[in-house]
Amino acid sequence: MTILVTGARGTVSAGLLRHLAGTGADVRIASSAPRPDQSLLDLHDPATFSAALEGVSQVFLYTNAATAADFACAAAAAGVRHVVLLSSNAVTTVADPDVNPMAAPFSAAETALSAGPVPVTVLRPGSFASNARQWVYGIRAERAVDLPYPDARVDAVDEADVAEVAYRALTDPGLWGATLDLTGPDAVSLVEQIRILAAVLGEEIGVNRVTREQWKRSVNRYMTSEYADALLDYWRALEIHPAPVSTAVATVTGRPATGFRTWVERNVGMFR
């Protein structure tokens, strides 16, 4: 049984590969810029699919809506028996997921892959705990973070938990075809995340409430205006209704989901 893992440079894939390393499974690592011991698979280029999928029985797949239908066809032609798709719970937590830029690519990929003959297990993580990395510069340089909606309560999930669930989905046929919403153990406000960071670092971190436009200007180098507006609307809604939390991590792994403080304690070095 050969397992193809895409997105080799991604955090979830890296965690999944660590789990698989101890099993003796035949693992094929794929990347758009592969090392000599890896396979070429560019999710933007369907011409790379067939060779990478040859002899593969299962796939861990990052989302690319533009080529998801092509991938589904190539997987079926190669005899793939199961795909684990890394999606997002935005498809169920935002309005109009088919057009909302936070959800639309994931919704389209889920639809395209599910329409094919290969069983698909869909992993829908919420907001990654590692999104806190966006605050590194402010914490290091100014000991302060700018937040437009500091009281937004998010479902911060540890990417390591997502990787472990992906591993279980690949090794437990009972999970084939399941859709799993993956969250942290509770909804934690952004300002509470800052407080936790400050406590673990042992220093004060200020919180500046900024306007939507101020925040959009601060991220316009790497985020489209449409995506920024969708994210701001999402945070605004979470100030009123916290993100729902799921027990799927605990159910699948047999242990509690990792809380945000534990994630910070494991990753505090990046904020120093």
Image: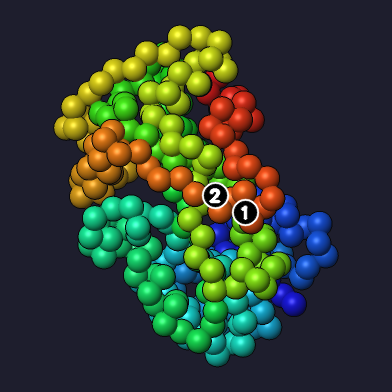
Mark 2 lies on a secondary structure that is: loop
Mark 1 lies on a secondary structure that is: helix
In-image side of 125 versus 190 (left or right): right
What residue lies at 46% left-to-right and 84% top-to-bottom? Answer: 116
111 vs 190: above or below: below
What residue lies at 62% left-to-right and 54% top-to-bottom? Answer: 251
Nearest the viewer among 74 and 44 is 74
Answer yes or no: is residue 221 visible: no
Q: Quadrant of the N terminus?
A: bottom right
Quadrant hosting residue 217: top left
Identify the residue position indicated by label 1 in the image: 251
| Residue type beneath disc 1 | Thr
Identify the residue position indicated by label 2 in the image: 247
Residue 154 lies, in percent from the top left, at 40, 38
Nearest the viewer among 114 and 42 is 114
Q: Disc 1 and disc 2: Cα gap in Å?
A: 6 Å
Q: Are marks 1 and 2 in contact (CB under 8 Å)?
A: yes
Residue 163 lies, in percent from the top left, at 61, 53
